Amino acid sequence: MSYSGFRLIKEALRGHSGWKPAWRNPEPQPGYDFVIVGGGGHGLATAHYLAKVYRKSRIAVLEKGWIGGGNVGRNTTIIRSNYLLAGNEPFYELSLQLWEGLEQDLNYNAMVSQRGVMNLFHSDAQRDAARRRGNGMILHGSDAELLDTDGVRREAPFLNFNNARFPIKGALMHRRGGTVRHDAVAWGYARSADRHGVDIIQNCEVTGFRIENNKVLGVETSRGYISAGKIGVAVAGSSGRVMSQAGMRLPIESHVLQAFVSEGLKPVLPGVITFGAGHFYVSQSDKGGLVFGGDIDGYNTYAQRGNLPVVEDVCEGGMALMPMIGRTRLLRMWGGVMDMSMDGSPIIDRTQIDGLYFNGGWCYGGFKATPASGRVFAHLLATDTPHETATAYRFDRFEKGLMIDEKGVGAQPNLH
Amino acid sequence: MIIPHPILGPRDAQEFVYLGDASLLNRPDWQAEDASSAFHDYQYQRNNPAGVHRELWFHEQGDRSWLVVTRDTTTHEILKAELARDVALAGETAK
């Protein structure tokens, strides 16, 4: 069933009695050509592009809980393509272009809103770095605009421009960046994948891999053995757990990142504002809540919750930047498990086991990458060659000294 | 989180800086034949377990001692804290 304005009017007149479930709930088949482990944004996007762009069939997505219940449901919904390095920016620009056409591609309203992302700077050195980054972005086909203090004041007059430690000297403005309704991304990809014949199997936990002669034959799951031609693992924070079942160690530590939503307010923020120096970034959801966050807690954890010192640190950053939020009450806070790679950049690559592919190490930046991650992972699974925008995301980059040190920070060296 | 420091008693985890897996105590032999791959594994590869994890914490805002803390990464419960010096001298293989 396609969604459209016409359909909406028709259903409104029929008392909304004709809506069908957005995806099937099939029993697992004994075998598939492609098995995607992980029914989050990246896994579902991979299945969608495998079926739709690469015309593959016999695809299953295995999810241990319900789809979209991991980090795609626990993030701060920001999309952007404002990276500097050649190994990164083409990939994130592809992602932003896919976001721009996502709703038509999926026939699903994901509320993609390009309301702009503004990275503040506070010194001459930071201005130079922002200018360089902006030039890098423009050279890769993205957009960037350097704002001076007055330019920032026009966008966001309510900021504290005269903070003694970090006075606002300007910002790098990325107008095509913005926010997306995060759950709708998972649901939209799931629905589209399902319509292209993908089996989405929920409550099906992978408990082991069957490997013979260094070739993967299938997965053991809580719902029985499923054989597979190729297996793609896209499980974010659970990467270490799942890949250890295949005997692999990864250059990844799992950490927790906390995020926060305030009570609903009238529209006050024009877009996304990041205050890197103060470890704080914020946007406003369409429901009115301020959505904000800061740094990871900084220790290994799978607990999906953090500790209070980071809450205090984030709120202090918020108060330093926007004193007007002082009377706002915090509504909710939560933690998501981040697969922190050692250089802060992702891995999308074959493993040393034939037929087993890995997509992870997203750190706290996986959401914006969802469409491109799915697209290039599908490309890798379908063709066995890396997509042209993802050639740098290899396992062996640590051995070869080819780290993608966009910020120079992964799990270490404690620079968050 | 409160870390039971073996000398100073219970201390807030905020006083500490976290380094990671306690296997970092076992630095590979730089003269070995396979030193290059051993150092790659030492530097970058992690077990990253969900459950009991032995890890290094540095008491930066305290007595500046290194501790090996045994902690459950699924609950944040701290099971044990030892001086890293004792662990290293005892020659325990930190896993």
Image (cartoon, rainbow, N blue to C red):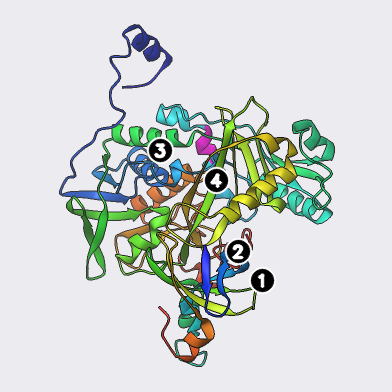
> Cα distance, mark 1 to mark 4?
27 Å
Query: Where residue A258 sits: x, y (%)?
Result: 53, 49
Classified by dominant secondary structure, the portion drawn in magenta counts as: helix
Mark 2 vs mark 1, CA separation in Å = 9 Å
Task: Give the CA distance from mark 1 to mark 3.
Answer: 44 Å
Q: Is residue A152 left or right of residue B88?
A: right
Q: Quadrant of the C terminus of chain B?
A: bottom left
- In the displayed orientation, state which residue is furthest to the front: B9
Depth check, mark 1 against mark 4: the one in front is 1
Q: Residue type at mark 4?
A: Ala
Mark 2 against mark 4, which lies toward the viewer? 2
Q: Is residue A350 above or below residue A366?
A: below
| Marks 1 and 4 share the same chain | no
Q: Is residue A235 magenta?
A: no
Question: On what subunit does the disc labeled 4 rest?
Answer: A
- Tag 2, which secondary structure? helix
Label drawn at residue A259? 4
Q: Nearer the viewer, residue A174 or A392?
A: A174
Image location (x, y in percent) of residue A150: 84, 36
Q: Is residue B5 above or below residue A319?
A: below
Distance between the Cα atoms at labels 4 and 3?
19 Å
Q: Chain of mark 2?
A: B
| Distance (Cα) linking label 2 and label 4 | 19 Å
Residue at 25% x, 58% y is A207
Q: Which residue is mark 1?
A: B61
Badge 4 or badge 3: first in the primary sequence: 3
The three-letter amino acid code for the residue at tag 3 is Ala
Which stretch is magenta? A96-100
Query: Which residue was labeled with disc 3?
Result: A186
Q: Amino acid at mark 2?
A: Gln
Q: Is residue A98 magenta?
A: yes
